[in-house]
Image (cartoon, helix red, strand yellow):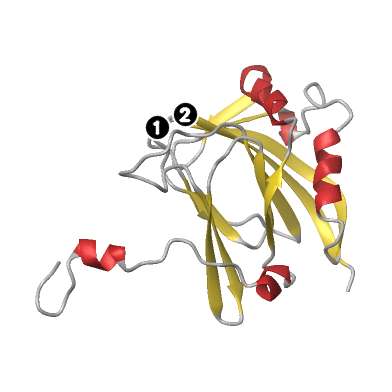
Amino acid sequence: MSGPNFPSPDSFLSGITTMVEPDVQKLQALDTWVVDDLYYPGYKKFLKLFNESSERHVDYGNGTLYYKRNMKYPTDIDPIKEYLSFIKFQLQNLPIRIKDFQKAWGVKYPPGAYSGLHCHQPGRQLTSVLFLDTPKPSVAYPLAGCLTTLQPADSEITYLTHNPIEGKMVIMDGKVFHGSYPALEDRHVFVVDFEYESVI
């Protein structure tokens, strides 16, 4: 709706900032942290999960989840659990102790599929999202396929957009709400959850 008291949709949307510079202190606060700009060179091996998984189902948003029975870690793909060690190494400077592995799965997003805002609970968890491919950029839909995170801190919400680039990964506290914009072409991610505890 537009008129004397309402801006046009285009002028309203053009005034919205889609990328916010992170506030380092807020990002390091317990229960709101997000670690991004990480790269895992062995990412391609997890594409096998989409051909070799024992179970799958279509989730809300029309993405298909692929996983082993009980969402066990795919040791046939990563026998020495190198990726799990990589996650722990990347978080070694945070005031947390990573505990038990919880679950792992892949998600295939066909065109139009998305992931609605959600968080990973109950309990204290962390989740890692590894991008397995890079969608072609779109001028008309620059956020297509992007992961977004919403971090509550001091009665504010920090909103970040993470571009899906193959090999890049985002690790976050399970309480951080996150989701993805609709995809324009097939894209794949690999997700792992751990329990953790504070050491402060």
Can residue 31 be seen from the camera position used here?
no
Q: What residue is at 68 percent from the left and 26 percent from the top?
A: 44
The label shown at residue 186 is 2
Q: What residue is at 59 percent from the left and 27 percent from the top?
A: 56
Residue 5 sits in which quadrant?
bottom left
- SS class, disc 1: loop
The label shown at residue 111 is 1
Q: Is residue 8 rendered to the left or right of residue 40?
A: left
Please name the amino acid that badge 2 sits on.
Asp
* Image position of 49 with respect to 91: above or below: above
Q: CA distance from mark 2 to mark 1?
A: 6 Å
Q: Nearer the viewer, residue 57 or 144?
A: 144
Where is residue 70? Give x, y as percent.
Answer: 73, 34
Picture mark count = 2
- SS class, disc 2: loop
Instruction: Locate the C terminus and report the quarter of the image it occupies.
Output: bottom right
Q: Nearer the viewer, residue 153 or 165?
A: 165
* Image position of 50 with respect to 94: above or below: above
> How many C-alpha atoms fall within 10 Å of the one at disc 2: few (<14), some, or many (≥20)?
some
The answer to which of marks 2 and 1 sits earlier in the sequence is 1
The label shown at residue 127 is none
Q: Is residue 12 rendered to the left or right of residue 151?
A: left
Please name the amino acid that badge 1 sits on.
Pro
Q: What residue is at 42 percent from the left and 30 percent from the top?
A: 185
